Image: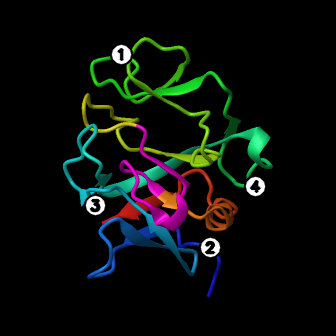
Amino acid sequence: MTDRKTPASPAAVLHRRPGAVPHHGLLTAFGRTLPCAIGRAGISSMKREGDGATPRGNLSVLEVLWRPDHGRRPMTGLPVRAILPQDGWCDAPGDRNYNRPVPLPYPASHERLWRDDAVYDIVVVLDHNISERKRGAGSAIFMHLARPGFAATEGCLALARPDLEWLLARLSTGDVISIP
C-alpha cells in the first residue's frame, strides 16, 4: 500500500465504530488507522459555538502551531508557527476577531494557546469557519494532542502524540480531513 493519497481523496477520514464510546473515533490516513477523540457531543452538521460537537465536513489543514519549550518542531509539509505565551484564539461570536488568533491579554472571550496541560503542545488548525466565517458557527476547531484515555474534546480531533507526529510528517498544504 502506498504512503501517499491519490489527488482526489482526502488525506484522512474519521470513522465511528457502532457501539463505541460516543467521543471515540478512528482516523484512517495514508494506510493506517489511528485512535482519536472527538467532541463530547459527537459529530454535528449544525455546529454551534460551545455545543461540544465535532463539525461534519471536509476540513482543510491550514497550519501547525507548536510549543517550542515542549518538544522539537514538527516535521511536516504544512506551515509551522511557534506558540508564544501571549497567543490566544478568540471564541466570542460577537467580536470582530471571532475564530481568529489574538494577542493576550484580550478583552473578549478567548482560549489561551500556551496551556499548562500538554493538549496544545502541537495544534493543527483546521478550516472550520475560518475561510468563510459565520458568527456562532464554532471556533478553534483543531487537531491536537489527546488527553489520557482519549477523553472527549470540546469539538476538536485529538490524537496520541506519536500518531499526530506520524500524520504531520505526511500532511501538506491542500490536504483535507473528512468527517462524514
The amino acid sitting under disc 3 is: Gly
The way the protein has been coloured in the rendering is rainbow
Residue receiving disc 4:
75
Question: The magenta stretch spans which residues?
Answer: 140-157
The amino acid sitting under disc 2 is: Arg
Residue 166 point in image, percent of width and height: 67, 67
The amino acid sitting under disc 4 is: Met
Residue 154 point in image, percent of width and height: 37, 48
Distance of mark 3 from mark 4, alpha carbons?
30 Å
Q: At 27% from the left edge and 82% from the top edge, which residue is drawn?
A: 18
Q: Nearer the viewer, mark 4 or mark 2?
A: 4
Q: At 68% from the left edge and 36% from the top edge, which residue is drawn?
A: 81
In front here: 100 or 59? 100
Instruction: Mark 2 or mark 1: name the one nearer the start of the chain.
Output: 2
In front here: 52 or 176? 52
Q: What mark, if any, has residue 96 been given in the picture?
A: 1
Instruction: Mark 1 or mark 4: name the one nearer the start of the chain.
Output: 4
Residue 54 located left or right of residue 82 = left
Q: At 62% from the left edge and 59% from the top edge, which residue is drawn?
A: 171
Residue contact at pointers 3 and 1, CB within 8 angstroms? no
Q: What mark, if any, has residue 4 been given in the picture?
A: 2
Secondary structure type for disc 2? loop
Distance of mark 1 from mark 4, alpha carbons?
33 Å
Instruction: Mark 4 or mark 2: name the one nearer the start of the chain.
Output: 2
> Magenta segment: does it hold 106?
no
Distance of mark 2 from mark 3, alpha carbons?
29 Å
Residue receiving disc 3:
42
